[in-house]
Amino acid sequence: MRIRFQKEHGGHRLICTRRDGSFTQSAVGPSLPEHDLAHFVVESELRLDQGFFGLINEGYSIQQLGDPAVIPSLPAGSMEAEVLTRTLQGLSNGAVAQSDFGASVEAELSRVPKGLTDAVITHMLQTYVTLLNSWDNVAEGAALELRWR
């Protein structure tokens, strides 16, 4: 799947095009590109198939994944991806210390996901910061493109 973060005249658009050519797109709020980039990092690094991008790849629309009526029916893995994403954002902005990452996740999920080691957390943070810097350097009208598996 191709993931495109487009800068549009003070706004942003997320466009996800699946391998079969189908796509979903949506205008996103000013802080959502950063949140969606964190989803990309977490889900890619930990091979989470039921997170935001995994579900889009399976056919969900961006609108469905933000619909309060749909959210309770999503697979359990979507909550895992959301908690990890928020925690990665907290790590990047200093709200969560790296030594507290696992405990912060466990407080919401009651367990730490498999494969979440200090080395993985460090790698996710480095990748996320790199993507944030890339996004900051995208010119108005241009886009940042990523590949999902």
Image (cartoon, rainbow, N blue to C red):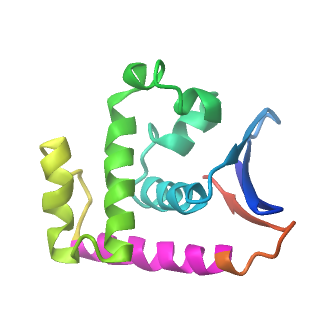
Q: Position of residue 31 (x, y in %)?
A: 55, 59
Residue drawn where x is 83% and y is 36% of the image: 21
Could you say which is closer to the camera, residue 55 or residue 33? 33
Residue 83 is situated, as x and y percent measured from the top left of the image, at 31, 49
Q: Position of residue 9 (x, y in %)?
A: 83, 62
91 sits to left or right of 57: left
Residue at the farthest front position:
10
Task: Answer with the quarter of the image where residue 130 lies.
Answer: bottom right
Q: Position of residue 119 (x, y in %)?
A: 28, 76
Q: Is residue 77 above or below residue 137?
A: above
Q: Which residues are magenta?
A: 118-135
Residue at x 21%, y 54% (from the top left corner) = 105
Image position of 2 (left or right of 71): right
Q: How many marks?
A: 0
| Residue 136, magenta (yes or no) | no
Is residue 145 in sight in this rendering?
Answer: yes
Q: Main secondary structure of the magenta part?
A: helix
Q: Residue at x 77, y 59 (%)?
A: 6
Q: Does residue 5 appear in this view?
A: no
